[in-house]
Image (cartoon, helix red, strand yellow):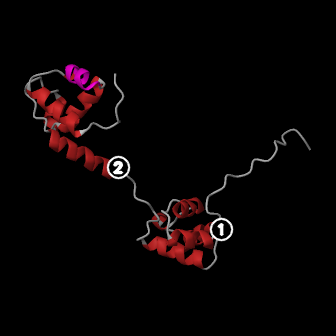
Amino acid sequence: MGTHDQHLSAEERATIMIMLQQGCSARSIARTLQRSPSTVTREIRRALDWPQRAAFVPAGSSTYDARAAGARACAMRLKRRRSRKLSEDGVLFGVVHHFLLEGWSPGQIAGTLKRMWPDDPHRRVSHETIYNCIYAMPRGELRKELIACLRRAMPKRMPRSRGQDRRGRP
């Protein structure tokens, strides 16, 4: 089979729709698209309504709509994506930003947030989340400001030094 991106493109969905209307089987569609038959079958089943899903629709009697299937797939991808706990426009980011400006370490901030809101896990972040938020920011003044607030104001995160292997030695 050919190499493709993981998701079906709009052209591939249109090909599926046209070939289903012509009465082609899922295997022949897959061969044409150079995709796995299970990919095509899964796409068709996902796009059909629930009553039609139970018994697979025979060739030629498809109600597959490429445009609707693409929109549904895009919506599902967005729905699956988790939102960040520390987004720049969030309240929690403001609290973390304030503590960083006060000279607190991410570990101290994480512990304080846990004590401030013991019953609300959505208002807690780990020290690692704070570091990731700072270092994942795009270049700009805010990033420079936050990195400067860290005790070791390194522009990049450095891997932990391994040192020598001292196992079995005193």
Residue 156's place in the image compared with 163, above or below, is below
**Which one is nearer the viewer's eye here, 45 or 150?**
150
Q: Position of residue 30 (x, y in %)?
A: 25, 24
Give the quadrant of residue 48.
top left
Q: Position of residue 33 (x, y in %)?
A: 25, 26
Please give the range of residues in magenta. Answer: 27-34
Q: Residue furthest bottom?
A: 102
The residues bearing labels 1 and 2 have C-alpha atoms spaced at a distance of 35 Å
Residue 38's place in the image compared with 169, above or below, is above
Give the quadrant of residue 52.
top left
Q: Residue at x 13, y 38 (%)?
A: 65
| Residue corresponding to mark 2 | 80
- Mark 1 against mark 2, which lies toward the viewer? 1
| Residue corresponding to mark 1 | 153
Helix, strand or loop at mark 2: helix
Helix, strand or loop at mark 1: loop
Instruction: Check disc 2 and give the amino acid type.
Output: Arg
